[in-house]
Image (cartoon, grey):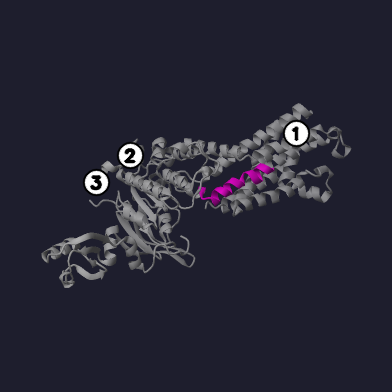
């Protein structure tokens, strides 16, 4: 009818849409879905989530920068390197390394992980994804991958700097240490996902995350290491996620396989909060 | 053999608590059609679109999109249906090109990104952050994402709201180009002009119910039964000359002008009758009643009345 009035943009778009096979109403192939959604899609999502973590670097600053700074300050204090009878002959520095490790895991799991997920839900990004062949859960999985990588990198730097610059003994049971760290990450990330599931806004998620962070960090021994806590607090600490994490990490650094209790406590938090998050997470 | 409808909605009903959003809505959209759902805020337009996309499940009734059930065959549906939703943002600190690359990777045979964004006037924006885009640019990016999987059906919800008139016209050109490729388009809108310009058929929806379903011109004709002719006669004549004509409904005078309302071949009838009486009609103008007239007539309300949010 008015084909000669086609505007340039229109022509370009037509070309774009024609560039592959012509659009026909052929019936859908019944191939399994996994064959039809390119596997590259997950990689693309992870890449963009990683870019966002880099461009909105609060998580990197508080999850990697601040703990490293704390470590260096503690490491530079001569008093932190003197053996303390009240700590069973350990110096304060090796006592604080597991506490800083739990600091890293808690900041990234409780605050950096849930905040973007909640704002994606808030802004309709997850809903927008619900209209594509890719389920919105892939974004959640991508966040887990990105935050896990940031956590592991930050922990590796903390441990290497502790050994190389401040004379921490090389962990005597690296396998047990890895297990303790992975279980700690699982527990704290599961709690973080529950926060993402329950919070109604990004602001609320950050408030809940920070509200959980400080008391948990107290029981990790940030202000009073576990061995110096009064008996009641020590008893509570054993059953908190970060208290259990510090015990398990400390024991494996000293060469022992950690006792069952902290490992079970961490596994329990991971399972209970993981299921809770799964049950209550809303995609819109 | 009967051609399968692209979208088939039968007796759709959706309530939110006590509020009935959509009540017994049935319509059928043919392949290759641009089908408009027009109605005031809160009429149930968006709810209908969301049910078609599988984002909401109907309380009653059934929906088929290319033979797929949006509730059951959600994943297959999203391979062949593209969506542009109201109020859906994208991460502020991602660049346009990064967002497009991500969405492109979701599909097996996606559209070419370069050509797509050139067509949408976003070619210079690939390296810009989403948050630096204007409202109109965000809207166009959203349309690009709806089309990037080369869908067979595109559902576009208020695609030109927030666009300036020029951008709106450019977008209309684009949508016509997409339709020319055989894509079926379900267009949710409250812009009259948009529906008149683009749609093959329009469903007028009010308070969750189908009020009328016809071509834009057909709806307009239904509203006032037709056309109005205005002219300045070269000499005086008796109104009875015209009121006696079968298609003429009313004849009014306004100063030197004569205003005739009626149906059918009104212009020819008026000119021939006057000519026979030795009168020439100068400055003749013809008005057709609009979709807006149709809406007011059929629902007793104006489209742009502020109401409950959609």
Q: Residue A239: x, y in percent?
A: 74, 48
Tell me whether marks 2 and 3 sit on the same chain: yes
Distance between the alpha carbons at the discs numbered 1 and 2: 66 Å
Judging from the image, what secondary structure is the residue with disc 2 in? Answer: helix
Q: Which residue is mark 3?
A: A1
Mark 2 and mark 3: span between their CA atoms? Answer: 15 Å
Looking at the rendered structure, the number of numbered marks drawn on it comes to 3
N-terminal-most mark, 1 or 2: 2
Extreme-top residue of the structure: A164
Q: Is residue A113 magenta?
A: yes
Q: Position of residue B40 (x, y in %)?
A: 41, 62
Residue at 57% x, 39% y is: A52
Specify whether A139 is left or right of B286.
right
Q: Quadrant of residue A228?
A: top right
Q: Residue A155: where, in percent of width, then height?
A: 69, 35
Task: Residue A121 in the image: state x and y as whole percent.
Answer: 54, 50
The dominant secondary structure in magenta is: helix
Left or right placement of residue A224 versus residue B101 in this view: right
The subunit carrying tag 1 is A
Q: Nearer the viewer, residue B251 or B62?
A: B251
Q: Which residues are magenta?
A: A106-125
Chain of the residue under the numbered disc 2 shown in the image: A
Residue holding disc 1:
A253
């Amino acid at each position: 009818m008015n084909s000669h009035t086609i505007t340039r943009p229109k022509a370009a778009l037509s070309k774009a849409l024609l560039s592959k096979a012509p659009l026909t109403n052929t019936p859908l192939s019944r191939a399994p879905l996994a064959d039809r959604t390119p596997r590259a899609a997950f990689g693309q999502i992870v890449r963009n989530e990683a870019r966002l973590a880099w461009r909105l670097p609060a998580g990197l600053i508080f999850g990697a920068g601040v703990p490293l700074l704390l470590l260096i300050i503690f490491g530079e204090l001569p008093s932190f390197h003197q053996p303390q009878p009240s700590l069973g002959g350990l110096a304060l520095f090796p006592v604080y390394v597991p506490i800083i490790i739990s600091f890293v895991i808690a900041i990234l799991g409780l605050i950096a992980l849930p905040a973007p997920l909640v704002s994606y839900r808030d802004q309709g990004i997850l809903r927008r994804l619900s209209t594509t062949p890719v389920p919105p859960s892939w974004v959640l999985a991508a966040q887990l991958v990105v935050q896990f990588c940031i956590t592991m990198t930050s922990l590796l730097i903390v441990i290497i700097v502790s050994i190389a610059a401040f004379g921490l003994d090389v962990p005597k049971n690296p396998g047990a240490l890895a297990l303790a760290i992975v279980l700690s990450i699982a527990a704290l990330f599961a709690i973080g996902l529950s926060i993402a599931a329950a919070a109604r806004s990004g602001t609320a998620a950050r408030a809940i995350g920070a509200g959980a962070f400080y008391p948990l960090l107290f029981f990790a021994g940030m202000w009073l290491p576990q061995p110096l806590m009064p008996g009641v607090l020590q008893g509570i600490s054993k059953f908190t996620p970060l208290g259990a994490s510090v015990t398990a990490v400390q024991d494996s650094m000293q060469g022992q396989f950690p006792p069952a209790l902290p490992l079970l406590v961490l596994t329990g938090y991971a399972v209970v909060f993981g299921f809770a998050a799964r049950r209550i997470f809303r995609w819109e | 053999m009967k051609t399968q409808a692209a979208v088939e909605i039968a007796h759709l009903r959706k309530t939110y608590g006590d509020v009935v959003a959509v009540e017994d809505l049935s319509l059928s959209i043919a392949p290759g059609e641009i089908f408009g759902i027009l109605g005031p805020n809160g009429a149930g337009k968006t709810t209908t679109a969301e049910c078609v996309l599988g984002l909401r499940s109907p309380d009653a009734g059934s929906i088929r999109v290319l033979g797929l059930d949006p509730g059951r065959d959600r994943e297959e549906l999203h391979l062949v249906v593209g969506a542009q939703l109201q109020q859906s943002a994208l991460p502020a600190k991602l660049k346009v090109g990064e967002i497009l690359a991500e969405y492109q990777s979701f599909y097996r045979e996606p559209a070419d990104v370069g050509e797509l964004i050139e067509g949408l006037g976003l070619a210079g924006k690939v390296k810009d952050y989403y948050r630096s885009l204007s409202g109109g640019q965000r809207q166009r990016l959203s349309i690009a994402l709806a089309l990037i999987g080369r869908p067979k059906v595109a559902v576009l919800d208020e695609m030109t709201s927030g666009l300036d008139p020029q951008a709106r016209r450019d977008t209309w050109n684009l949508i016509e180009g997409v339709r020319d490729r055989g894509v079926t388009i379900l267009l949710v809108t409250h812009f009259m002009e948009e529906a008149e310009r683009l749609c093959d058929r329009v469903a007028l929806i009010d308070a969750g119910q189908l009020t009328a379903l016809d071509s834009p011109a057909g709806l307009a004709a239904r509203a006032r039964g037709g056309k109005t002719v205005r002219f300045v006669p070269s000499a005086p004549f008796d109104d009875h000359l015209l009121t006696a004509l079968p298609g003429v409904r009313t004849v009014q005078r306004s100063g030197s002008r004569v205003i005739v309302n009626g149906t059918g071949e009104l212009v020819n009838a008026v000119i021939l009758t006057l000519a026979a009486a030795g009168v020439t009609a100068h400055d003749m103008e013809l008005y057709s009643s609009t979709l807006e007239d149709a809406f007011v007539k059929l629902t007793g309300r104006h489209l742009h009345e502020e109401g409950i949010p959609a």
